[in-house]
Amino acid sequence: MEDLAKRGGAIEVLAAFLKLGLTSFGGPIAHLGYFRDEFVARRRWLDERAYADLIALCQFLPGPASSQVALAIGLRRAGFAGAFAAWAGFTLPSAIAMTLFAYGAAAAGALGAGWLHGVKAVAVAVVALATYNMARALAPDRARGSLAVAAAIITLAAPLAWGQIAAMALGGVVGFFLPDVEATQGDAQSPIAIGRRVGAAALIAFFAFLILLPLAAAATSNHAIALLDAFYRAGALVFGGGHVVLPLLQAAVVPPAWIGNDAFLAGYGAAQAAPGPLFSFAAYLGAAMTPAPNGVAGAALCLAAIYLPSLLLIVGVMPYWAALSAKPGVRAALRGVNASVVGLLIAALYRPVWTAGILSAVDFSIAAAAFLLLFSWRAPPWAVVLLGALAGAALS
């Protein structure tokens, strides 16, 4: 059994995340379930508590939470090279697919939507299993189970990002007063070797870009700087990630006529079918908004711009997070926050995963069969996703 304290290399990290980047359907909440199965249960790169702490941290930071968790796992495992490898492996497959879609959107739309709906039904099973597994680990008693349900209710009642933040804040406050019933020790892996000076420099850079890029875009007529500013702000200011970034990007790129609204929504629909992070939608927009033959360069620019804030925040916060999370009061609050994370999973299981994936008895049957394969037969997720797509196409 692998030692939790063992460090790895960037190639190992790249291979692990490339597999997930090719097979992780279902959106950011499902991604967290895939990550747990791969890096906590199977590879044992970190333990349950350390993984829950990373989720809690990334839920509080703006940006795509699942991609930030991937960055943090890669950073823990193999330093800065591991962080880049994790991002590249998890993000580039969907980014390449979305760039290609920008060049052939009409042909791709002719393939039909039945297979896509089958994938959405399988996503229900993936998220349900992730919710079950994380509830067992993070909300195993009455108090934290009740807190998880309360967080789910708050999140569903206020579906915007502020509802998630309120649920997490409630979890932290309530968790501070919960008795410490955990007798296990923390993660045995060594702290991430990032100095506080490096962390402070990253945070300064984060705010400097946020302030200076709009000024540079206003002072020049350079289209590349305008794109960099728009996508950096979207990555820096969105809480909740995923679907929450849609209105920010739409307001940034449609009014100036960089892209039409129909083309924008067509790309967003295609992003639902791609594995990996939804923020790869930025690659589609960059390719679609940049005149040929520079579409690939535009895709790379927008993709880098929307993810740069996440990298700066993770590098900036992690050196301080290691010391903070070791304090008893902070650990107590984290127990409540982690229970609230389960509530976010419960809420996401209903909306948007269930509401988008279960529209008929056939959809429910596909989801139930997928859950059986994942839970009882321990089938690999990529195989279940493939079977779901084939079932959806056959039954549409």
Image (tube, grey):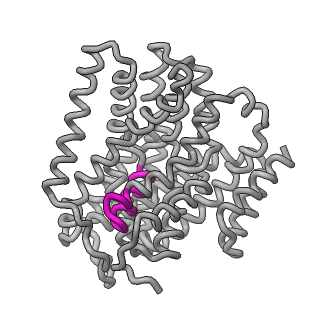
Above or below 180: residue 388: above
Residue nearer the viewer, 155 or 255:
255
Question: What span is in magenta?
Answer: 65-83
Above or below 11: residue 164: above
Horizontal arrangement in the rendering, residue 374 relative to residue 318 (left or right): right
Q: Position of residue 26 (x, y in %)?
A: 60, 51
| Residue at (25% x, 14% y) in the render | 219
| Residue at (64% x, 36% y) in the render | 270
| Residue at (48% x, 25% y) in the render | 250
Q: Position of residue 278 (x, y in %)?
A: 52, 43
Horizontal arrangement in the rendering, residue 12 relative to residue 68 (left or right): right
Q: Residue furthest front?
A: 293
> Is 310 inside the magenta-drawn segment?
no
Residue nearer the viewer, 63 or 311:
311
> Is 76 inside the magenta-drawn segment?
yes
Horizontal arrangement in the rendering, residue 210 relative to residue 270 (left or right): left
- From this viewpoint, is residue 177 visible? no
Q: Position of residue 77 (x, y in %)?
A: 37, 68
